[in-house]
């Protein structure tokens, strides 16, 4: 297939643009899927004795032919050829100095808001990434990366001279193949951040009655000895995550009530399994047809995402026989309930996918709680140190839950641009971590360490036109000057995150760059089209018709209205719950 790159595809007429995005997905499926397992390396598992009509905790047996695919602890795949993923070595690993990039290029001097979305949208994407992936918080204590602080660094005054970071835990395959990294969560889109991926965690979150998850007497998640909410996955915790885990726990429990009523003889486990399927699919639908069109506010994107879920065909034409090729069928009928599509490569998230979601600039320096009754700010304000980790509880339980959710619905996150990375994230003290973290420097170093290509190589490998000079990256002279101050004229040295934050033009309404969007095109479809529970088994026999109807009839506004009824009207003041809610004047 001949593929023609159209840099500003968003200027094409709607249907031409949709065809172009479809062709781009095919191009990427052909050139950007690389398995990191050699044949026979993936541990063999069996599905005998497993209820294959339900999602498993560890992700085993989603794929019945290859039961281990996407399971907890399996390797990240790659979106770029394996021989390009060696990971940088000392001669380039620390160049330019990650701390210089952090302080000169990324650091927020004043807050620039992203005014097309609300703070819910920021918490939401981290909540989703915790479903899809994590390299884990442990890292390798015996293998450190270390680089000197730049000569003008204020930290030198404290006596600190270097910055240290533990390497990511990895599997080394000798000198012929690059190291690989394991996902400590399941790769599947299965809401594992809510349900957990192992028996011990899962046992703590179940009530044991009618399929429901455990909540405390105030209706919110219980708190563990570590001061964090008891839920499936609570790493890098903050108020936004606590809020969403609470909402989805409540939603799960409401779905249990529905099933208990219609199937009074079902056991706790039967209700749980069905409620998990429905809750998970509803979450995936909301992400696909609501969150994405909010963060990428463009008519083409809106249609493309709805096509992914529903297909282009009107309902009355959906009963015609599917005699089409896979691609036409996916566009006509949608991915959901269609045949699975692996494009010849086993499913797993990739390192490159992790990298394009380094969205720490979305975080606000302060969250000030508003009253949902009159929209006015209260005197309760929390900086990052106060709203992160154990501080999440102070926000969630120190206020009315409805006021917290209202605050997230009405306030803006930060824009994903240069110079807007919260400075508190550059001196982050995570409980249990061996050092204070400069998250901006870490974002840069992790990509280099894991062999994620720098910006221009990334563009080349993703069928995008590479930049010839800094001014090809951005049409904003200030951004170009900032890039040059750190990278000189060396456009090949620009890191993926730096180039992405600097990049313009963007499609109007896009909160992130077209370079990041290219990886998104591939991943957004793939996590749906490879999952048995979104394809072959998206049926009434597995979900129940009642379950399918529930998913079809719900959006995030409805979820908020059900789980926090006081906010029903506020959530419905907008056509999409991720757009800033209308505050009464
Ligand atoms: C206060 C809130 C947050 C805190 C405390 C936090 C903290 C962290 C920490 C400590 C890491 C691991 C650093 C390392 O590699 O050593 C990390 C990684 C990451 N964070 Fe955040 N983060 C927050 C919010 C967010 C948000 C809103 C996003 C948006 C998507 C995000 C996306 C990521 C991604 C993609 C990674 C890489 C994960 C991996 O390597 O598997 N984070 N964060």
Image: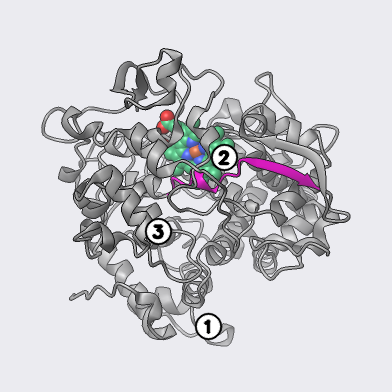
**Is 175 situated above or below 350?**
above
- Circle nearer the N terminus (3, 2): 2
Label 3 close to label 1 by CB (< 8 Å):
no
Nearer the observer, 228 or 317: 228
Q: CA distance from mark 3 to mark 1?
A: 30 Å
Which scheme is used to colour this image of the protein? one colour
Q: Position of residue 340 (x, y in %)?
A: 40, 62
Q: Is residue 522 visible?
A: no
SS class, disc 3: helix
Residue 289 sits in quarter? bottom right
* x 35%, y 39%: residue: 101
Residue 193 — which label? 2
Residue where numbered disc 3 is placed: 520
Residue 8 seen: yes
Report how far apart the C-alphas of labels 2 and 1 lie in the structure: 36 Å
Q: Earlier in the sequence, mark 3 or mark 1?
A: 1
């Amino acid at each position: 297939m001949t593929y023609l790159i159209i840099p500003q595809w968003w200027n094409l007429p709607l249907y031409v643009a949709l065809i172009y995005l479809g062709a781009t997905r095919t191009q990427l499926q052909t050139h950007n899927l690389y398995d990191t397992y050699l044949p026979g390396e993936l541990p063999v598992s069996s599905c005998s004795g497993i209820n294959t009509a339900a999602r498993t905790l560890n992700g085993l047996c989603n794929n019945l032919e290859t039961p281990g695919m996407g399971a907890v602890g399996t390797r990240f795949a790659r979106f770029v050829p394996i021989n390009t993923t060696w990971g940088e070595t000392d001669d380039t690993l620390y160049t330019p100095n990650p701390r210089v990039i952090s302080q000169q290029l990324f650091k927020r001097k004043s807050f620039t808001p992203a005014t097309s979305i609300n703070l819910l949208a920021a918490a939401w994407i981290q909540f989703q990434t915790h479903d899809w992936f994590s390299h884990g918080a442990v890292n390798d204590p015996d293998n450190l990366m270390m680089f000197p602080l730049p000569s003008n660094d204020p930290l030198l005054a404290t006596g600190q001279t270097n910055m240290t970071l533990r390497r990511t835990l990895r599997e080394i395959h000798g000198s012929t193949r690059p190291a690989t990294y394991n996902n400590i969560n399941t790769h599947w889109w299965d809401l594992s951040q809510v349900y957990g991926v192992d028996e011990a965690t899962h046992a703590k979150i179940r009530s044991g009655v009618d399929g429901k998850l455990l909540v405390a007497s105030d209706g919110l998640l219980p708190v563990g000895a570590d001061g964090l909410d008891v839920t499936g996955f609570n790493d890098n915790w903050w108020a936004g995550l606590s809020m969403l885990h609470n909402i989805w726990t409540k939603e799960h429990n409401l779905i249990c009530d529905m099933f208990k009523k219609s199937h009074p003889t079902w056991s706790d486990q039967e209700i749980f399994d069905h409620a998990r399927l429905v809750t998970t699919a509803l979450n995936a639908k909301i992400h696909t047809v609501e969150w994405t069109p909010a963060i990428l506010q463009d008519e083409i994107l809106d249609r493309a995402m709805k096509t992914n879920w529903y297909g282009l065909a009107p309902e009355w034409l959906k009963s015609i026989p599917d005699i089409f090729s896979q691609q036409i069928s996916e566009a006509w009928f949608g991915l959901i309930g269609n045949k699975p599509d692996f494009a010849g490569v086993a499913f797993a998230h990739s390192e490159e996918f992790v990298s394009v979601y380094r969205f720490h600039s979305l975080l606000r320096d302060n969250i000030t709680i508003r009253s949902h009754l009159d929209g006015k700010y209260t005197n309760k304000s929390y900086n990052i140190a106060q709203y992160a980790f154990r501080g999440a509880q102070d926000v969630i339980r120190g206020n009315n839950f409805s006021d917290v959710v209202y605050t997230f619905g009405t306030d803006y996150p930060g824009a994903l641009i240069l110079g807007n990375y919260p400075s508190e994230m550059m001196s982050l003290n995570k409980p249990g971590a061996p050092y204070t973290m400069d998250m901006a420097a870490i974002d840069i170093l992790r990509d280099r360490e894991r062999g994620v290509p720098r910006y221009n190589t990334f563009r080349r490998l993703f069928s995008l036109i590479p930049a010839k000079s800094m001014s090809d990256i951005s049409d904003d002279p200030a951004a170009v000057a900032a890039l040059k101050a750190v990278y000189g004229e060396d456009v090949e040295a620009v890191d993926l995150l730096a180039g992405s934050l600097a990049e313009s033009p963007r499609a109007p309404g896009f909160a992130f760059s077209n370079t990041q969007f290219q990886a998104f095109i591939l991943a957004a479809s793939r996590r749906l089209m490879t999952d048995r529970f979104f394809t072959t088994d998206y049926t009434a026999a597995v979900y129940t018709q009642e379950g399918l109807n529930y998913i079809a009839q719900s959006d995030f506004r409805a979820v908020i209205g059900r789980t926090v009824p006081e906010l029903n009207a506020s959530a419905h003041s907008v056509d999409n719950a991720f757009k800033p809610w209308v505050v009464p004047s």
